[in-house]
Amino acid sequence: MAMGSKLSLFFLSLGFVAYSSSASHNDPSVVGYSQEDLALPYKLVDLFSSWSVKHSKIYVSPEEKVKRYEVFKQNLKHIVETNRRNGSYWLGLNQFADVAHEEFKSTYLGLKTGMDGPARAPTAFRYENSVNLPWSVDWRKKGAVTPVKNQGECGSCWAFSTVAAVEGINQIATGKLESLSEQELMDCDTTFDHGCGGGFMDFAFAYIMGNLGIHTDDDYPYLMEEGYCKEKQPQSKVVTISGYEDVPENSEVSLLKALAHQPISVGIAAGSKDFQFYKRGVFEGSCGTELDHALTAVGYGSSDGQDYIIMKNSWGKSWGEQGYFRIKRGTGKPEGVCSIYSMASYPTKSITGHGA
């Protein structure tokens, strides 16, 4: 069969997959393009070009462009094959479509649970006796979640997860939603955490406590790289916490109890291609083999018979469901899908404290 005919059949099948998924789930762009575009007999290079324009990709040399084109083809094949056999979640051509998977893991997954530092000691769990939990919770609707941020090409997910949890408890305690500084953690929390080289949320919570607060984004904006720690300015605003606690391991009920009261920092095993290209739906598929990424749980609910937890990611709004990720709960596995119940923690805050 001629190459042109093979490409035509390939994209016709791709269009069919997109059509089948979108028709039943009201999503006209399952893989990032309309079903009409995907049903046309595009040449693969044309799709790569249009994707490059959409995501503002600029390559330093023709050789680099050829390299990325080959990666793009392999990733697209995985997306199409996965969407063909799945029924609960779908993958899409997002900003990572020209990134090889091993490169992706080393660049964007920055949770380091085995780093040198204090052991993760058992702590009190203040929500242990919570009863009559609501059927659903969404802290976005309660005004406790800032807009989705983007960590860029830096393994700083740990800082974004920490900050999102602190933003949440601060809003709950004070009524004010403040966007806080991941960059301060990158630059100043260096005893046990290592900026783009990875970190751990409990260490970051401890830093915020010891530093008597964390600055706002306006005072200490994100640079997407490690910088020098800036000294506090007398007039700068800081947001404080009074402590932090760990959620009991491998307990879905415990995580839901905590999540009913505030957003929670969570570590998951995200080192899979399915996670890299997640587009929408309730995820229950391929995971990594170790805890390597940090997100923030901001709610839970149910839809079409699927129970899920809502996670805020830090890869911008072009990834997932406008920057969010729904992961299946109620599977019966103690550790949950992608080990989501293995490591979670949250900051605590008293209304009377330093700063906000």
Image (cartoon, grey):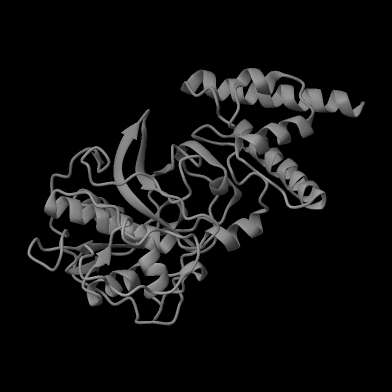
- The C terminus - image quarter: bottom left
Seen from the viewer's position, the closer of residues 125 and 232 is 232
Q: Is residue 52 above or below residue 192?
A: above
Seen from the viewer's position, the closer of residues 226 and 110 is 226
Q: Residue at x 52, y 45 (%)?
A: 285
Q: Is residue 162 left or right of residue 337?
A: left
Percent x, y of residue 28: 53, 22
Q: Residue 268 lies in what quarter of the image?
A: bottom left
Q: Residue 213 lies in what quarter of the image?
A: bottom left
Q: Residue at x 16, y 51 (%)?
A: 172
Q: Is residue 322 above or below residue 217?
A: above
Q: Residue at x 92, y 26 (%)?
A: 2
User: Can see residue 280?
Assistant: yes
Q: Is residue 134 left or right of residue 160?
A: left
Percent x, y of residue 65: 77, 47
User: Can see residue 246?
Assistant: no
